Image: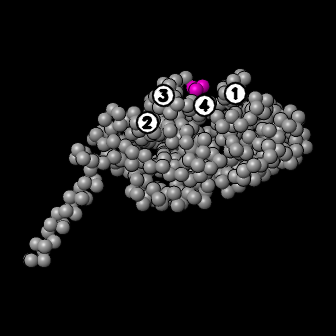
Amino acid sequence: MTAFRRLAPLLALAGFLSLLVATTGSGSPGPLRIAVEGPQTGSQAPNGLDQLRGVRLAVSQLNAHGGLWNGRKVAIFRADDKAEASRGKAVARQVIAKRIPFVIGPYNSSVGLANLSIYRRHHVLPLWMTSEDKTGGVGATVQPMNSQIAPIEARYVEKLHAKKVAMLVDDTANGAFTKGMATRLRAALEKAGASVGWISIKETTAKGLPSTYYADEVSKALGTKPDLVYVSTYFPEGVRIAKALAAAGANPPCLMGLANVDNAFVAQTTLSQAQRCDFSGVPAATEMPSAKTYVGQYRAAFGKKPSVWGSFTYDSARILFRAINRAKSFDFAKVEHALRRAKGFHGATGTIAISSKTGYRKIVPVSILRVNKQKRFVLAK
């Protein structure tokens, strides 16, 4: 009994400290932490930072209006995977170790293939930003999936009556999305009787490379005298390919995949280089009427114009908050149930409805784009 009396003050102090850690000074619950995973450093950092800012804007707006249904505020945990599949598992385990229940991301499909199953297995609910259909599963997404993009690209090629296509494809370990898109399009074209050549593009993060780094691959593609050149890479590689295509002088039509649709692409190319190809993809927020308010708020908050994918993470965060509020719970299954019944949600990227069966967005804002004289991605006429 004497020993217990000596321990009693220590036990009481421990209980008080535990309560202090779990609450704010006002006695309300501590902030709910959500993870934002993407390439926040590295060659794709312009994409990842735009995504991070989109969530930051949504969180600041939520908190300014009192937080979630029970008054709980939200805080962000940055999960930087550098667009490297080899980092995916470690980043997911870091999020899990911090007992964070929700993640927006990852962005790169190769990373998602490595870590989305880990998140799901440990009951971290993802609003994934990946597009490879193999990354689908529990959770939801507001951005387009490969199976939704491929038919749009196939219709574009069909209108060109292209019978011979040369593909330049990032099929490295980090190119799950780009390889998946090219594979789908090749299958559709070959089924329609077209001849398709495949030339591998090896992703590199080396600095100081010449603008003609992919000149040999481009020359090989053009040497087949194609009716169309199809480029399925992320924008760091796409920039060099656009430069090599422009330098080669040959002018068969060119289509680039949506992973090149980024402000950084047009910033790193001349107008003639940027206009060398059309693009499948989503316009930057500045070109979407539904994003007018978002663009103004983003500029006011960060002093710069938004790019493409921050508007999708902004919508992801807001649709997550609405699901939590409707479920009146932070429970994994209850929030997912509410997410998959989302419809009529007016987002920066347009009206959103989620399929209860797949978690996919029912109608995706994907079009064929071109770069105008102001170096902005706009709808192709």
Amino acid of disc 4: Ala
Q: Which of 379 and 356 lies nearest the eye of the viewer?
A: 379
Query: Label for residue 300?
Result: 3
For marks 3 and 1, give the CA distance: 22 Å
Which residues fall within the magenta stretch? 284-288
- Of tags 4 and 3, which is closer to the observer? 3
Q: How is the image coloured?
A: one colour
Query: Label for residue 375?
Result: 1
Instruction: Identify the element where label 2 is drawn.
Output: helix
For marks 4 and 2, give the CA distance: 18 Å
Q: Residue at x 25, y 59 (%)?
A: 18
Q: Is residue 6 positioned above or below 269 on the image?
A: below
149 left or right of 304 in image: right
Please provide percent x and percent y for residue 264. Answer: 66, 37
Instruction: Identify the element where label 4 is drawn.
Output: loop
275 left or right of 54 in image: right
Residue picked out by circle 4: 284
Amino acid of disc 1: Lys
Q: Dot 1, how many residues are within 10 Å of its Cα: few (below 14), some (14-19), or many (20+)?
A: some
For marks 2 and 1, give the CA distance: 28 Å
Q: Residue at x 24, y 47 (%)?
A: 25
